[in-house]
Image (spheres, grey):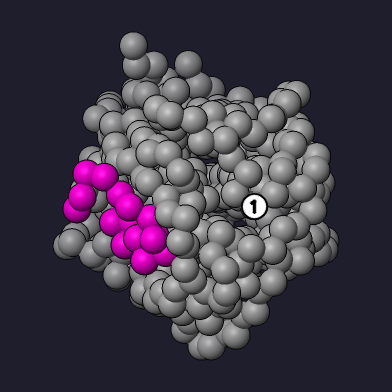
């Protein structure tokens, strides 16, 4: 049965600091690489989210010994392609596109047919973007020409390195090919549009042979396959995508200040900060330090009475793709119209986010102009909602739910928001943390 939260009051001012759950993207990548490292790896500060737990369960079904203790995992790896491929294995990635797309890269040398499934939302998402390059390595996908889940993969004994051009700006596609490259003898070459680089940084940290040549709008990545690597320990930093909801809540609240401690502020992740600062937000990143290639720091943010409208540079899209829903809310505090282009990728997420975001903005009294890949948002800086708002039928998309909560706490009204359990996908502590700031949520 769906769980509904009620919010009938704006949040009061606050001045505090918080710690956010561990980064989901890095968690999934470290778990997968640890499963092929030689020896015992220990990963701490793992978020207890469904996406991370789905990854753990998939790896266990492939014969990996994993011992989980609260937010810590011990993973016992036996080297590249050390999975145990039993007959009739079915892997369920749940709602996690990262888990599903990346694990296919690890499975290109299977000697058994393995079926990959997911929930209703994930089963509607495009998998051709990883199926196409992985077929070039030698893997076979069944049924033939199927582009979504459920789908089966059958690996090959004759894996070969490939040359691949990634034009979407998808870190998932790039990482899937990078993981597959570990199984291929020789050099795999990837020409990739700029996107998150967590996998590249992990490869460097683990001394996996990788060369990266950075160009203006793309990277050329070369990976030498079939080189085993040692186990490792890793403490997951805070998740920036989760932090973004608290950043915007603070911007939109009156007389509030917030420090978010120990967050991953990798430059390929913080497009949201760049966009909001272009709008006059003055978000500061302090106490920066390097941790195994990643940049970690504290985020300082304070309220802003009014923001500037923006014609958002499309070059920032891939570095803010998971934060656009909450960025759209910030646009309400502007006097002019803000424009965001080339965002068709948003409609290929857990839900058609561009469409749903526009619908929610219209529902609360904000005018938008929408087409298939862009949105124009007309600011309404004096918006004060007094009517009843019901948010439902959004395919249980966790980011839509969290966006709605931030809107309710920022602009008032009497809200009923369905599917609160959706936060378990990525950020199960979301409501608890929001309440710690003084929010009244029933």
State the image quarter where residue 89 is shown. top left
For image coordinates 76% across by 66% down, the residue present is 207
The location of residue 179, given as percent across then percent down, is 55, 58
Decide if residue 100 is on the left or right side of residue 347: right
For image coordinates 64% across by 63% down, the residue present is 226
The location of residue 36, given as percent across then percent down, is 67, 48
For image coordinates 28% across by 31% down, the residue present is 120
Whether 318 is drawn above or below 433: the answer is: below
The location of residue 92, given as percent across then percent down, is 42, 31
Whether 242 is drawn above or below 133: the answer is: above
Residue underneath mark 1 = 80
What are the residue bounds of the magenta stretch?
128-145
For image coordinates 80% across by 49% down, the residue present is 232
Q: Nearer the viewer, residue 240 or 163?
A: 163
State the image quarter where residue 299 is shown. bottom right
The location of residue 296, given as percent across then percent down, is 75, 58
Residue situated furthest bottom in the rendering: 216
Asked which secondary structure carries label 1, the reply is loop
Whether 46 is drawn above or below 141: the answer is: above
Which quarter of the rendered picture does the N terminus lie within? Answer: top left
Q: Nearer the viewer, residue 368 or 43?
A: 43
Residue situated furthest front in the rendering: 157
In the image, is residue 144 part of the stretch drawn in magenta?
yes
């Amino acid at each position: 049965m769906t769980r509904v939260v009620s919010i009938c009051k704006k949040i009061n001012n606050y001045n505090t600091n918080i710690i956010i759950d561990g980064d989901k993207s890095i968690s999934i990548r470290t778990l997968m690489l640890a499963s092929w490292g030689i020896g015992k790896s220990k990963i701490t500060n793992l978020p207890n989210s469904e996406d991370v737990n789905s990854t753990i369960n998939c790896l266990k079904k492939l014969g990996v010994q994993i011992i989980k203790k609260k937010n810590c995992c011990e993973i016992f790896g036996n080297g590249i392609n050390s999975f145990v491929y039993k007959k009739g294995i079915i892997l369920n990635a749940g709602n996690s596109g990262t888990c599903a797309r990346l694990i296919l890269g690890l499975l290109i040398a299977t000697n058994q047919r393995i079926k990959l499934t997911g929930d209703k939302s994930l089963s509607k998402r495009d998998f051709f973007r990883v199926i196409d390059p992985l077929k070039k390595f030698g893997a076979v996908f069944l049924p033939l020409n199927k582009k979504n889940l459920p789908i089966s993969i059958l690996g090959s004994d004759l894996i070969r390195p490939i040359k691949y051009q990634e034009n979407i700006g998808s870190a998932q596609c790039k990482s899937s090919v990078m993981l597959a490259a570990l199984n291929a003898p020789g050099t795999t070459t990837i020409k990739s549009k700029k996107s998150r680089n967590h996998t590249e940084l992990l490869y460097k940290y683990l001394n996996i042979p990788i060369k990266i040549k950075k160009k203006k709008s793309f990277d050329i990545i070369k990976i030498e396959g079939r080189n085993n690597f040692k186990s490792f320990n890793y403490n997951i930093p805070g998740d920036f995508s989760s932090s973004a909801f608290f950043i915007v809540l603070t911007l939109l609240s009156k007389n509030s200040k917030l420090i978010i401690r120990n967050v991953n502020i990798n430059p390929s992740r913080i497009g949201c900060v760049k966009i909001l600062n272009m709008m006059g937000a003055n978000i500061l990143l302090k106490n920066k330090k390097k941790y195994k290639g990643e940049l970690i720091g504290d985020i300082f943010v304070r309220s802003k009475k009014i923001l500037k409208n923006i014609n958002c540079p499309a070059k920032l899209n891939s570095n803010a793709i998971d934060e656009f829903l909450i960025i759209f809310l910030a646009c309400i505090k502007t006097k002019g119209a803000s424009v965001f282009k080339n965002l068709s990728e948003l409609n290929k997420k857990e839900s058609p986010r561009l469409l749903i975001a526009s619908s929610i903005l219209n529902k609360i009294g904000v005018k938008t102009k929408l087409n298939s890949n862009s949105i124009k948002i007309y600011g309404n800086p004096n918006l004060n909602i007094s009517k009843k708002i019901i948010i439902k039928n959004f395919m249980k998309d966790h980011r839509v739910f969290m966006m709605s909560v931030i809107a309710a706490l920022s602009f008032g009204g009497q809200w009923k928001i369905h599917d609160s359990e959706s936060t378990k996908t990525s950020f199960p502590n979301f409501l608890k943390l929001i309440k710690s700031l003084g929010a009244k949520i029933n």
